[in-house]
Amino acid sequence: MKLKKQVTVCGAAIFCVAVFSLYLMLDRVQHDPTRHQSGGNFPRSQISVLQNRIEQLEQLLEENHEIISHIKDSVLELTAHAEGQPALPQHPLNGSWVLPAESRPSFLSVSPQDCQFALGGKGQSPDLQMLAVYSLLPFDNQDGGVWKQGFDITYEPNEWDTEPLQVFVVPHSHNDPGWIKTFDKYYYDQTQHILNSMLLKMQEDPRRRFIWSEISFFSKWWDNISAQKRAAVRRLVGNGQLEMVTGGWVMPDEANSHYFAMIDQLIEGHQWLEKNIGVTPRSGWAVDPFGYSSTMPYLLKRSNLTAMLIQRVHYSIKKHFAATQNLEFMWRQTWDPDSSTDILCHMMPFYSYDVPHTCGPDPKICCQFDFKRLPGGRINCPWKVPPRAITDANVAERAQLLLDQYRKKSKLYRSKVLLVPLGDDFRYDKPQEWDAQFLNYQRIFDFLNSRPDLHVQAQFGTLSDYFDALYKKVGIVPGMRPPGFPVLTGDFFSYADREDHYWTGYFTSRPFYKSLDRVLESHLRGAEILYSLALAHARRAGADGRYPLSDYALLTNARRNLGLFQHHDAIAGTAKEAVAVDYGVRCLAGGLGTPLLFTTPPQDETRSSQDSLPEKTVIKLDTSPRFLVVFNPLEQERLSVVPVLVDTPHVRVLSEEGQPLPSQLSAVWNSATDVSVLVRLPALGLRVLQLHKSLDGHAAPRASTRLYLHGRDAPVRKRVAHPTASYACAGPHPQSLRQAGEQQVHRVSSDFLVYGTRTSKDKSGAYLFLPDGEAKPYTPRDPPVVRVMEGPLFSEVSSYYQHVQTVVRLYNVPGVEGLSLDVSCLVDIRDHINKELALRFSTDIESDDTFFTDLNGFQIQARRYQRKLPLQANFYPMPAMAYIQDVQSRLTLLTAQALGVSSLRSGQLEVILDRRLMQDDNRGLGQGLKDNKRTCNRFRLLLERRSTANKDERPISFPSLLSHITSVHLNAEALVMPVALENPALPALRSFVPLATTLPCDFHILNLRTLQAEVSYAEAALILHRKGFDCSLEAKNLGFNCTTSQGKVGPGLFQELELGSLQPTSLTLMYPLGTASNSTNIHLDPMEIATFRIRLG
C-alpha cells in the first residue's frame, strides 16, 4: 500500500512538473527581452518571430523531456527496490486467466529528435538506386556475341596516345575453407602446397605479386612453418609483394550470415594479422559470395578499408553497368544522410573470376593466356584453342592479341587503369604452375613495356596496387570519391549467372545448420560478455587464477568455429554432405555447450550429436530444493517466461528471496512436466531460482489441455484471447489477429504449400531454385491431431501433421513476449522427392507489390515483386525479419534462422521452410540436397498499427523499437542452468546485476570481447550498435520500459567496476580514433556501429 502511494505521488509530481515546465516555457518565450533582441531589432515579418518562438519551444520541450526521463528513472528505481517480482495469477469464475496488474509502471519515452532519422529527407539522391535499376532493366538476355551476356566492344587505336593504359595483373588463388572437401582435407591436399610454393617462388623475382584472403587457412599454415619462413612472409608483406585482402577469417556468405558473426570473423582475422604479421588490410576482395549485401561495405568502411571488389552480380546488371561505365562506384548506405559511409567498389564485368573470364570479353582468347592449361596438363580450354608458351618468335603476336582484350575491357571503366585478376579455385599449388604463369606473363609484359608505340604499361600487382594507381591517376586521396564516379545505394540480391538460373535456393538450403549457427552465435556472445565481466570482477577481487588461460583458448576456438561457418559454402548449405557434417561437429565442439561458462550446459541445449535437435534435461526433485541460474544475454532488463522440465507436477518455483513466482504447468508427451516461470531478469545478469517439491497443494496452476483427433471431433473453432492480443483459428490454422486495445480484427491466415521442380534438364539444387510453377497446397495423408492448451501465462494451439508440427502460442504477460504471436514449425520432409515446403501468411493488408526484408539483421531493404521476372527471382534472404505494410498496418515476420522469403501477391508473406532435392544443379557441388534433418524453425508474428497515413515510396525503411526488441528476444533466449546437486554452495549463489544504468533501448551491445587474456588488466572490445527505428508504429500497453537519449550513453555503465580507459577505435580495433578517456561518455549516430577498446578493473 505504501508503495502504491509512493508511485501515485511520483506520478502526480511528473504531471505537475510537465505542466509547470510548459507554462514557464511559454512565459519565458513571451517575456524574455533578450530573446526578442536576438532576433534582430527589425524582424522582416511576424512569421520569423513566430518561427523563432517555435524553435525555442522545441528546444525547451527537449530539455523538459530529459528532466522527465530522469524522474521516471527514479520512480523505476523506487518500485524496483520495493517489489521485484510480479504477483501470482488469479483464476476468476468465468474460466479465463488474469494476471494481476504489473506493479512497476512501464514507460515509452522516445525523444522527438530520435524519430527524425527514420523520416529521412536529408542528403542528395544517389546516382544509382538498385530498386530503380531493377524497374528500369528489361532483363531480356540477348546474345552479345563473344561476350555472351554483354555486347560487342570497339575502340579507336589512338585512344591511349595521350594517356597510356596501365595494366595490373593480380595473381590470386581462391581457397574455400570447406566445399567439396573438408577444411582440413583441402589444407593438407592443396592449401599448404599453395602457400609453400608462394613463399619459394615470390622470392625468386621482386616483380612478382600475390594476394590472399582466407586467414583461417593462413593461420593454420603459419602454425606449421619455421621462424625463418615466418620472417620471409613478413618481408614479402612488408615490401608489397604479398597482400592480405579483406583479412577476415573467411570470405563470408552475405545472404544468410548475421552481422554479429560477420563482424566477429573480421575481428578474428584482423587481430590475428596484427599480432602475427603486423599488417592491416586496406582493400576488400569478395569474388565468390552468391550476391552481395550492403552491410559488408559498411563493415569494411568502419574497419578503415578504402576500396573493395565484387564479382557475382546478376548478368543483366553487369551488362547495364558496363554499358554506362558504372562498374566502379561509391557504395553508400541507403540511410546515410551524407557521404560518411561511402566506399569505392569495383565490380568485375564478366561471367566468372577464372582466367578465361578476366582478361577481356572473349573467353576463347583469354583461356589461351591461362598457362596452367598448356598442352600436356590436367586441364584444357573448352573453346578448343590451347595456350602456347611465349617465345621470342611468338611474343609480338601473342602480346598484341592479349592487349586487344585488355583495351576492350578497359573501355567498360572510366579510368585508364585496368585490373586483371589471374587465378581460380585452389590455383598455384605446384611450383610448375608458378613458373608457367609468372615466366610467360613476364615475357609479355617485357615486350609490351618495351614498345612505346603501344601506349601500355603492364605489370604484376596486388589489389591495393591497382586502387592506389587509380586514385593517383585521378589525383585524389585513397577513400575519397573519384570525380565523375557514381554513388550507388542498395544491394545485389538476387543473383543469376545465366538464363533464369536464380541462386535463391541457398537462402533456405540445410535450414538445420542455419538454425544451429544462430544458437552458437547467441551462446558465444553470452559467453564472451560473461567471461569479460567475470575476469574484470575476479581481477578486482585479486582472484585472477580462477579464470585460467585455457578458458580463453576455448573462447578462441568457439570464435573460429563460428567464423569458419560464415564461409559462403558453409552457412549457405552448399557443401558436400560430409563437409556439412564436419561443420556441424565443429559448431557442436566450439561452443554449443560453452563449457568454459557453465559447469552444466544450458538446460535446453543437450544435443546427442551434431545433427540432432536439442533436448531438455529433466530436473529431478526431492525433499531438498534445486537451484537454477538464469542468464539474460540482453542489455535490457526482460520479463520472460522461462520453461523448465521437471519429473513431478508437484512443484513450486520461488525467487532467490523465497517469494513464490507466477508459473504454469503444461503437459508434455512424455512423463515429465513442463513448468513455465515468469521471471524478471536483470540486463546481462544472472538470477537464481529455487524449485521445491510441493505436496501441500501449493503447486503451480495447471493449464487445461484438449485434444482433437483426426477430424473425428468437430473442427476446432477456437478463440485464444489475452489482454495483450487475441487470435482465432479454424482447425489448426490462425484465421485472424487483433492487437490489444484495437477494435479492428485483421485477417491473418496461414497455409503450408509445396513447390516442385522442373521436369526439363535444369532442376533445383543446393544453389538454384527452379520451381515447376506456382506452389500447390500441402495435402497430408491424414488430418492433423490438434491440441489446445490454455493457462495463466500462455495459451497455444499445436497441430501435428505428417511432415510438420506447428505450435502457435500467445503469451498472457506484460512486455515484449505478450505483444506478438510465437510460431514454431518442426519440419521433417525426409520422405519427399524434389519438393520444397513453404509457409504462407495471407492478410488483408494492402501491400501491393512492395515488401521489406532485412540484410544480415543489421538493416532493412525495400523489395518489389517484379512481374517481368520469373517467380524464383522474387525470393530474397531473410536472416532476421520481413514485413509487409499499408497505410494503416504493418505485419512483421521475425525469424530465429535465415530462410528465403517473398511476397508474391498483395497481403502475402511466404517463407521456404526446407528443401529436399535429388540432383545436382550443375554449379560444381556434384550432389543434391538429400541429408535433411528434423528441423525446428522459430518465428514471431507481430502486428502493428501505423500512425502516419502516407504511402511511403522511399526505398528506406526501419523496424519499430518493439520489432527490434522482439527480434533480440527471439534470437537471444534466456539460458537456464541447473546447479549441480552435489554443489549446493548456498552462500555463493546470488543474483548478478552487472550494469549500473539502463542503456537506452535503441542501443545494442553487440559484444564485450576479451582481447588478450595474458596481460595483467582485462582489456576488451566493447562493440555498440545504435539502431534506426520507425516511430510511426504505435504500440499500446507496451508493458516494458523504453527510453532513448539522442544517442548518448552516460558515465558509469558497469556496476562495481572502474573503467581504466575507453579508447574509440575502428571496427576491428586496428586504428585508434580520437583520444582515450576514463569515462563512458559515448555518442553514436543512428545505425552506427562503434568499437571501443576498454580496460575494466
Image (spheres, helix red, strand yellow):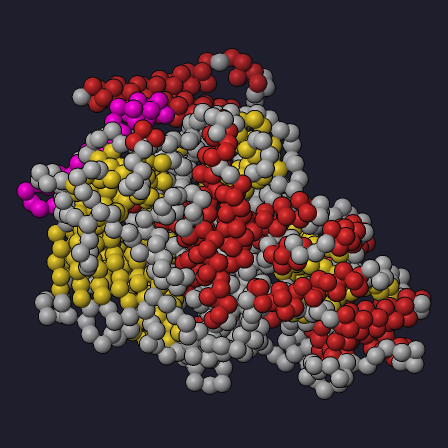
Residue 910, placed above or below residue 333: below
Left or right, residue 657 beside residue 61: left
Residue drawn at the location 19% of the way across and 53% of the way down: 672
**Any part of residue 316 in sight:** no
Q: Position of residue 1062 (x, y in %)?
A: 58, 30
Residue drawn at the location 51% of the way across and 63% of the way down: 570
Q: Nearer the viewer, residue 258 or 556?
A: 556
Which stretch is magenta?
A: 73-96
**Which quarter of the figure is the N terminus placed in?**
top left
Q: Position of residue 322 (x, y in %)?
A: 68, 67
Q: Position of residue 39 (x, y in %)?
A: 56, 20
Q: Is residue 534 magenta?
A: no
Residue 103, placed above or below residue 902: above
* Residue 233, picture quadrant: bottom right
Residue drawn at the location 86% of the way across and 68% of the way down: 442
* Residue 139, picture quadrant: bottom right
Residue drawn at the location 10% of the way across and 41% of the way down: 695
**Any part of residue 6 in sight:** yes
* Residue 659, picture quadrant: top left
Circle count: 0
Left or right, residue 621 beside residue 581: left
Residue 326, placed above or below residue 386: above
Q: Residue furthest front?
A: 982
Q: Position of residue 942 (x, y in %)?
A: 32, 51
Left or right, residue 366 beside residue 1053: right
Left or right, residue 293 beside residue 395: left
Q: Nearer the viewer, residue 1009 or 906?
A: 1009
Q: Residue furthest left?
A: 93
Q: Nearer the viewer, residue 584 or 891?
A: 584
Residue 450, placed above or below residue 50: below
